[in-house]
Amino acid sequence: MKPYTEKDEKLAQYAKAMGHPVRIFILQFLDTQCSCFAGDISEQLPIAKSTVSQHLTALKEAGLIQGTITPPTIKYCINKSNWEEAKELFKVFFNV
Amino acid sequence: MKPYTEKDEKLAQYAKAMGHPVRIFILQFLDTQCSCFAGDISEQLPIAKSTVSQHLTALKEAGLIQGTITPPTIKYCINKSNWEEAKELFKVFFNV
DNA sequence: TTAGTTATTCGTATTTTTACGAATAACTAA
DNA sequence: TTAGTTATTCGTAAAAATACGAATAACTAA
């Protein structure tokens, strides 16, 4: 039925998560900061905190980031293994 | 105001275009077929032709593919230069 | 001109995304 | 307990994405 593979779906999922400039920014920010709080991210962006939260949730659900609760804050960082998987999928896709 | 760059927006745009398994399939199909008609693509997919058309339009607007009219068909193929640009943007993003 | 082919556009419906501010949850410290 | 901090969730609204079938456009060939 479906002509596309699991890998195609996974790649599409990662691509979709990256399909918004705010989320690209967050990913790059986390990549350089290693880890930081939602507030640190939020104060870099000209949008409401609740909207940032939604973007963080989207990235979390796609598997690209993860959050560790350290009350009253939440420390966010890149999900290394999934990040590597995404990198590999894009690599193969672009024949790199 | 905007903390993200033109490149971030471009990357997000390409990622968004890739954010659906059908569009991933189409891109891969065109990458191997070099060029083909909308009908060739459509018959590989279990969705309506009009929906395929919409996906083709999305890919065209993102710049990843281009169509050449050869009545009564339209020959689609990868937009090489933009494809290379996308590849490069993802490459830099993932520190490859 | 008329019929046939291909592909898009139109009209429509449903779902998802994006965004905001207010309200809430969870924890700490006074 | 009460106030203060952080971040999410809730409620809501507007816009965009996804999907379908019918209608249309554009061209060719008989």
Image (cartoon, coloured by chain):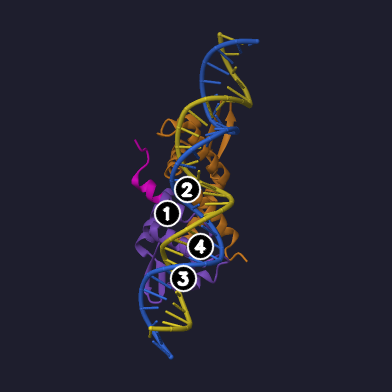
Chain colours: A purple, B orange, C blue, D yellow
Q: Circle 1: is it few (<14), some (14-19), or many (20+) Cα within 10 Å? A: many
Q: Which mark is residue A38?
A: 3
The location of residue B10, given as percent across then percent down, is 56, 54
Q: What is the chain letter for disc 2?
A: B
Q: Over which residues does the magenta segment extend?
A: A1-11
Q: Secondary structure at mark 1?
A: helix
Label 2, label 1: how many angstroms apart (C-alpha)? 9 Å
* Residue holding disc 4: A51
Occupied quadrant, residue A82: bottom left
Quarter occupied by the N terminus of chain A: top left
What residue appears at the point 38 percent right and 55 percent down from the top-left corner? Answer: A88
Q: What is the chain letter for disc 3?
A: A
What residue appears at the point 49 percent right and 73 percent down from the top-left corner? Answer: A40
The location of residue B96, given as percent across then percent down, is 45, 60
Circles 4 and 2: CB atoms closer than 8 Å:
no
Task: Say which of C5 and C3 sits in front.
Answer: C3
